[in-house]
Amino acid sequence: MDPVLTTSMILERDDTAWAELGLVVERAQRGDRDAFGSLVEQFQPTVYAIALRRLGNASDALELTQDVFLHVLERITQLREPERFAGWLRQVAVRMAINRATRRLAPPSVETGILEGASMQSDEPLDQLIDRERAERVGAALAKLKSLDREALDAFYIRGHSLIEIALMLDVPLGTVQAPTAHGPEAAKG
């Protein structure tokens, strides 16, 4: 058979498959639970494989797979090109797996990981006492913050991530981590 003809037949078959997928996604976007169920059945092995590769633990991967499909169910109406569902789903799965892997790592202790590295060492007992008091006050203030706020501050000021990177890592809108005034993290970077 002619290679060009064979290639065009494969492309047509692929186009048909993507078009059929797009129709199922459109039905799911209109609230058809059976259509969404068929998407879950079709793509669950792929999402599980992504999660397992990123997390390295079968039970964590299974839990994340469920979370990914719940997330997608809530946001499927936002997908503008239904035939691109597979790629969109893959991106969601990868992003959520990275976020889960990042969050499950034990956060560094404020006293040992952040404050000791940031404070200047001095031989004077008075300077050491002042540094210790500052560290305790900053630690107490950080302890009063919500987990998301602590993670965002650590990612921005200590680890040097951009606001966009932080929003992706924490799976929140950019406005959630963006500074409300010119004196916030954005001003500190620039």
Image (cartoon, rainbow, N blue to C red):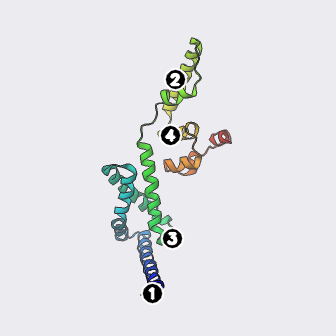
Q: Callout 4, which amino acid?
A: Glu
Q: Position of residue 80 (x, y in %)?
A: 52, 69
- Lower sequence index among marks 4 and 3: 3
The label shown at residue 81 is 3
- Secondary-structure class at tag 3: loop
Q: Cα distance, mark 3 to mark 1? A: 33 Å
Q: Cα distance, mark 2 to mark 4? A: 18 Å
Q: Which residue is tagged 4? A: 151
Q: Cα distance, mark 1 to mark 2? A: 76 Å
Q: Cα distance, mark 4 to mark 1? A: 58 Å
Q: Which residue is tagged 1? A: 2
Tell me whether the residue at label 2 lies in contact with that at label 3, contact meaning CB atoms closer than 8 angstroms: no
Determine whether 110 is above or below 37 in the image.
above
Q: Identify which residue is drawn at 42% across, 52% down.
A: 97
- Secondary-structure class at tag 4: helix
Q: Residue furthest bottom?
A: 1
The C terminus lies in quadrant? top right
Front-lying residue, 14 or 150: 14
Q: Position of residue 118 (x, y in %)?
A: 57, 28
Q: Callout 2, which amino acid?
A: Glu
The N terminus lies in quadrant? bottom left
Front-lying residue, 80 or 93: 93
Front-lying residue, 18 or 148: 18
- Lower sequence index among marks 3 and 1: 1
Q: Which residue is tagged 2? A: 136
Q: Residue furthest top?
A: 125
